[in-house]
Image (cartoon, coloured by chain):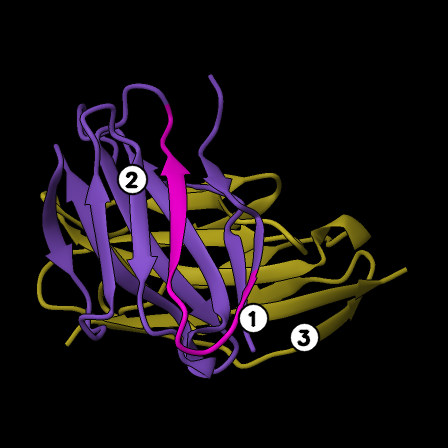
């Protein structure tokens, strides 16, 4: 099975712009979670989507949003970018069936805001 | 709230040395516990996990035992290799239906030949 894929892998934007990141989960996985990784704050949970609905949300401002499509692919959007949004954004997929609570991570999208 | 406290890094060891990375947690309920590893330029890979008290997770020579009495999940390896150089994250997961993972700050491990 193919793993979790994220596109693009690298992105450079300027302050005030917006950005959309994409995540394709492992085939058959219906839950997708997003995390932000920074040197200062570590790994922080952004939100989780299941069956096209946001199921859980972390403590991030409304500039951070996401959605999930019927094929379970997910996108996250950050509007009005700030310098502090520079980070590695990781996507994880989860099978949501059986008793496994393991999550599978993609390679991440590294966003640099100038 | 739920939290994970990890041993501060960086940690530098010689090849074949014994490794311990400490991890303690605070949680309301009975979490599952994980160790993830991140190699340079990559995402996170699950190293091992334990879902209930006294469970021992093991993989690639690494072990960790879920200790409810001390709320700990310390990572150990008897003889490290250069290829073990990476960042290690301890994490907890509380509830099905809520897939949020709570991570520790990460410990950077460097193994010197």
Q: Colour of chain A?
A: purple
Mark 1 — residue? B107
Same subunit under labels 2 and 3?
A: no
Is A33 situated left or right of B75 in this image? left
In the rendered image, residue A105, in percent from the top left (x then y), is placed at 43, 43
Q: Nearer the viewer, residue A64 or B72?
A: A64
Which quarter of the figure is the N terminus of chain B placed in? bottom left
Cα distance in 3D space between marks 1 and 3: 7 Å
Q: Residue at x 40, y 49 (%)?
A: A21
Question: Crowdedness of circle 1 by 10 Å Cα count: few (<14), some, many (20+)?
Answer: many
Cα distance in 3D space between marks 2 and 1: 30 Å
Residue at the extreme right of the image, as rendered: B113
Q: Residue B11 got which mark? A: 3
Q: Nearer the viewer, residue A29 or A23?
A: A23
Cα distance in 3D space between marks 2 and 3: 36 Å
Specify the segment rendered in magenta.
Answer: A12-26
Say which element carries label 3.
strand
Chain letter matching colour yellow:
B
Mark 2 — residue? A74
Residue B40, picture quadrant: bottom right
In the image, residue B98 sits, relative to residue A114, either above or below, namely: above
In the rendered image, residue A6, in percent from the top left (x then y), is placed at 47, 41
């Amino acid at each position: 099975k193919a793993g979790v894929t994220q596109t693009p892998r690298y992105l450079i934007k300027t302050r005030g712009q917006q950005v959309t990141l994409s995540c394709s989960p492992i085939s058959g996985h219906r839950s997708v979670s997003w995390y932000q990784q920074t040197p200062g704050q570590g790994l922080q949970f952004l939100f989780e989507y299941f069956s096209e609905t946001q199921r859980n949300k972390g403590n991030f401002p409304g500039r951070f949003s996401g959605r999930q499509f019927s094929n379970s692919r997910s996108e996250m959007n950050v509007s009005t970018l700030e310098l502090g949004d520079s980070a590695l954004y990781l996507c994880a997929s989860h099978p949501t069936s059986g008793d496994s609570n393991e999550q599978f991570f993609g390679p991440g999208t590294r966003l640099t805001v100038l | 709230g739920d939290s994970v406290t990890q041993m501060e890094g960086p940690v530098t060891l010689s090849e074949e040395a014994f490794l311990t990375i400490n991890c303690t947690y605070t949680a309301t309920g009975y979490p599952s516990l994980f160790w993830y590893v991140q190699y340079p330029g990559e995402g996170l890979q699950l190293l091992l996990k334990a879902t209930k008290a006294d469970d021992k997770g093991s993989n690639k020579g690494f072990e960790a035992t879920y200790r409810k009495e001390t709320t700990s999940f310390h990572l150990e390896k008897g003889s490290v290799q250069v290829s073990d150089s990476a960042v290690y994250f301890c994490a907890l997961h509380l509830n099905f239906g809520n897939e949020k993972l709570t991570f520790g700050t990460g410990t950077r491990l460097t193994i010197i030949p």
